[in-house]
Amino acid sequence: MGDTEARAASPGASSSGATLADRIDALFRVVRRPDREQYSHEEVARACREATGESFSATYLWQLRTGRRGNPTKRHLEALAQFFDVPVVYFFDDEQGSAIARELELLGALRDAEVRSVALRAVNLSPEGVGTISDMIDVIARRESAADCGEP
């Protein structure tokens, strides 16, 4: 099977629940330009056209990102992976794709100044201190989750 016939392993929902559209959207949300602005569909499409030498429009990219279109070629996914600096396996392997997605979410969270401040201060704590902070975060997260669900 050639590059142009090769397709993403699962353009729909995967066993981890992430669709191809979800994964592409996550890249746009988390991976930012140096000025911290989100990349435009046109910027990414242009880079992918240059990388592949194939047709790759901003509309096509938007369709992939929103799930209105599926089954991109392997070369298109390779170009997207190259642009966003993630391994191409992010699109093809559910287990590794999920691990990469978790790393991306962490990077996105660290962009928040308050989260980054807490993480940097925790670096100097003992393992026991980090465990205590982790336990406190778990308790607060459970409380907030219960409050969101309307539980007392």
Image: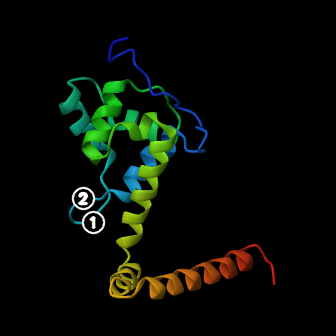
Label 1: few (<14), some (14–19) or many (≥20) C-alpha neighbours in 10 Å: few
Judge left or right: residue 70 versus residue 143: left
Residue picked out by circle 2: 33
In the image, residue 84 sits, relative to residue 123, either above or below, namely: above
Q: Which residue is more in the foreground, 23 or 60?
A: 23
Judge left or right: residue 28 versus residue 43: right
Q: Which residue is more in the foreground, 75 or 118?
A: 118
Q: Position of residue 54 (x, y in %)?
A: 25, 23
Which label is found at residue 152?
none
Instruction: Give the residue type at disc 1.
Output: Arg
Instruction: Give the residue type at disc 2.
Output: Arg
Colouring rule applied to residues: rainbow
Query: Where's the C terminus, which quadrant?
Result: bottom right
Considering every residue shown, the one lying at the far top of the view is 1
Which label is found at residue 36?
1
Q: Position of residue 110 (x, y in %)?
A: 37, 72
Where residue 96 sits, quadrant-wise, is: top left
Query: Where's the N terminus, which quadrant?
Result: top left
In the image, residue 3 sits, relative to residue 152, either above or below, namely: above
Q: Which residue is more in the foreground, 119 or 83?
A: 119
What residue is drawn where x is 41% and y is 65%? Answer: 106
What residue is drawn where x is 41% and y is 41%? Answer: 90
What residue is drawn where x is 35% and y is 33%? Answer: 77
Secondary structure of the residue carrying tag 2 is loop
What residue is drawn where x is 28% and y is 34%? Answer: 79
Secondary structure of the residue carrying tag 1 is loop
